[in-house]
Amino acid sequence: MHEMSLAEGIRSIVQDQALAHGFARVTVLRLEIGRFAGVEIPALEFALDVVLRGSPAEGARLEVIALPGRALCYDCSTTVEIAHRLDPCPLCGGGKLIPQGGDEMRIKDMEVL
């Protein structure tokens, strides 16, 4: 389950930011996760619940912002949203799509005290 290592990375970032900016507690943690990031949200929520214990983010409300999958269609030269990596272009039906986004995962922001 790679969600546990993702949660450990998030904890490390939160702790580093708490030291750098002098806050004691995170009340809300917002994550942006792309459709193609390969992250199982329920597994990540469970891992964060375990890993964040004893950290400034223990008990923080987690908000996940789902980012769409995007691809550039070579047939119509348009960037489009797609649900699956192998979907055809929803505008022209072309099959020459190059993924342009949706595989990212990042901390968008935190509300802190």
Image (spheres, rainbow, N blue to C red):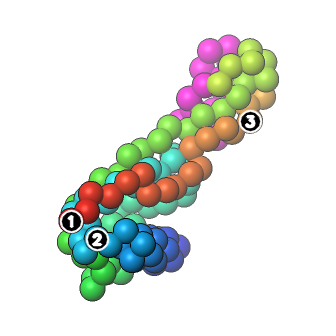
Label 2–label 1 contact, CB within 8 A? yes
Q: Residue at the spot x=42%, y=72% of the render?
A: 20
Q: How crowded is mark 2: few (under 14 residues within 10 Å), some or many (20 or more)?
A: some
In the rendered image of this protein, does residue 14 appear above or below residue 106?
Answer: below
The magenta stretch is 80-94
The rendered magenta stretch, by its main secondary structure, is classed as loop
In the rendered image of this protein, does residue 113 appear above or below residue 83?
Answer: below
**For marks 3 and 1 on the same chain, the one whose residue lies earlier in the sequence:** 3
Work out whether residue 21 or residue 46 is closer to the camera in this orientation and state it: 21
In the rendered image of this protein, does residue 19 appear above or below residue 92?
Answer: below
The amino acid at mark 3 is Ile
The Cα atoms of the two marked residues, 2 and 3, are separated by 41 Å
The Cα atoms of the two marked residues, 3 and 1, are separated by 42 Å
Q: Disc 2 or disc 3, which is closer to the eye?
A: 2
Furthest residue in direction bottom, as rendered: 54
Q: Residue at the spot x=51%, y=47% of the render?
A: 34
Q: Tell me the residue that label 1 is attached to.
A: 113
**In the image, 55: left or right of 69?**
left
Q: Tell me the residue that label 3 is attached to.
A: 98
Work out whether residue 13 or residue 31 is closer to the camera in this orientation and state it: 13
* Position of residue 22 measured from the top left corner of the image (x, y, whole percent): 32, 72
* Position of residue 66 measured from the top left corner of the image (x, y, whole percent): 42, 44
Label 2–label 3 contact, CB within 8 A? no
Mark identifier at residue 53: none
The Cα atoms of the two marked residues, 2 and 1, are separated by 6 Å
Q: How crowded is mark 1: few (under 14 residues within 10 Å), some or many (20 or more)?
A: few
Q: Residue at the spot x=47%, y=41% of the render?
A: 67
Q: Is mark 1 on a helix, strand or loop?
A: loop
Q: In which quarter of the image is residue 89?
A: top right
Q: Tell me the residue that label 2 is attached to.
A: 23
Q: Residue at the spot x=57%, y=44% of the render?
A: 102
